[in-house]
Image (cartoon, helix red, strand yellow):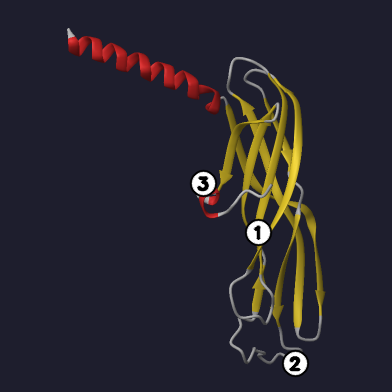
């Protein structure tokens, strides 16, 4: 009898805890890298060529719950790295914050938006006469900026409702900036 009672209490606790956590999983957030500006801007100097592109993320927010959600404030941080041509060492970490408001999201509905864009440059050292140029300090002959990830937080009435980080380990390796 005691084992049955303990099992029943355990099962009830599981259902209560699972039910309390269900709100966390009612919102599904996904993202994909997206080149915002398709045209690239290229310019050359006598010793280098630079290409500039605008990149961001396409974010989809899906309500998997059975009730409509209103007044959702989406805040995000784009993490990216900037490399400087001719500089030996790790790239500089940069961030860009943004926000998006979802007035209403119906039950089982979804909405999508594009984040603000960041400028990513790729610079390559080239020889004007076809010769090979290099840096005497040992720096790489190319410098490429890159996207590192996206961290999204969704607030409802000022309270954190859902959170998403891409890649998954981003939230443990970076800090949310208020």
Q: Nearer the viewer, mark 2 or mark 1?
A: 1
Nearest the viewer among 9 and 170 is 9
View extreme (top): residue: 1
Q: CA distance from mark 2 to mark 1?
A: 34 Å
Neighbour tally class for label 1: few under 14, some 14-19, many 20 plus, Cα within 10 Å: many
SS at mark 1?
strand
Q: Position of residue 144 (x, y in %)?
A: 66, 69
* Residue under numbered circle 1: 80
When asked about the image quadrant of residue 153, the answer is top right
When asked about the image quadrant of residue 99, the answer is top right
* Residue under numbered circle 3: 168
Residue 129: give its label.
2
Q: Position of residue 140 (x, y in %)?
A: 61, 80
Q: Which residue is pictured at 65% across the width and 59% down the height? A: 80
SS at mark 2?
loop
Neighbour tally class for label 3: few under 14, some 14-19, many 20 plus, Cα within 10 Å: few
Q: Which residue is pictured at 60% across the width and 38% down the height? A: 30
Sooner in the amino-acid sequence: mark 2 or mark 1:
1
Residue 113 vertical position relative to residue 92 in the rendered view, above or below? above
């Amino acid at each position: 009898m005691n084992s049955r009672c303990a099992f029943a209490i355990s099962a009830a606790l599981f259902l209560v805890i699972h039910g309390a956590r269900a709100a966390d999983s009612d919102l599904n957030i996904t993202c994909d890298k997206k080149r915002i500006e398709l045209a690239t801007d290229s310019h050359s100097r006598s010793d280098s060529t630079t290409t500039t592109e605008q990149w961001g993320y396409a974010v989809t927010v899906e309500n998997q719950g059975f009730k409509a959600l209103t007044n959702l404030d989406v805040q995000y941080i784009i993490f990216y790295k900037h490399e400087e041509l001719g500089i030996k060492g790790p790239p500089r970490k940069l961030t860009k914050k943004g926000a998006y408001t979802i007035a209403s999201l119906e039950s089982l509905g979804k909405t999508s938006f594009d984040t603000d864009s960041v400028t990513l440059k790729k610079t390559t050292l080239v020889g004007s006469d076809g010769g090979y140029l290099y840096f005497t300090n040992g720096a790489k002959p190319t410098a490429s900026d890159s996207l590192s990830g996206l961290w999204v937080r969704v607030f409802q009435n000022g309270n954190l409702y859902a959170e998403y980080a891409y890649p998954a380990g981003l939230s443990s390796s970076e800090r949310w900036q208020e």
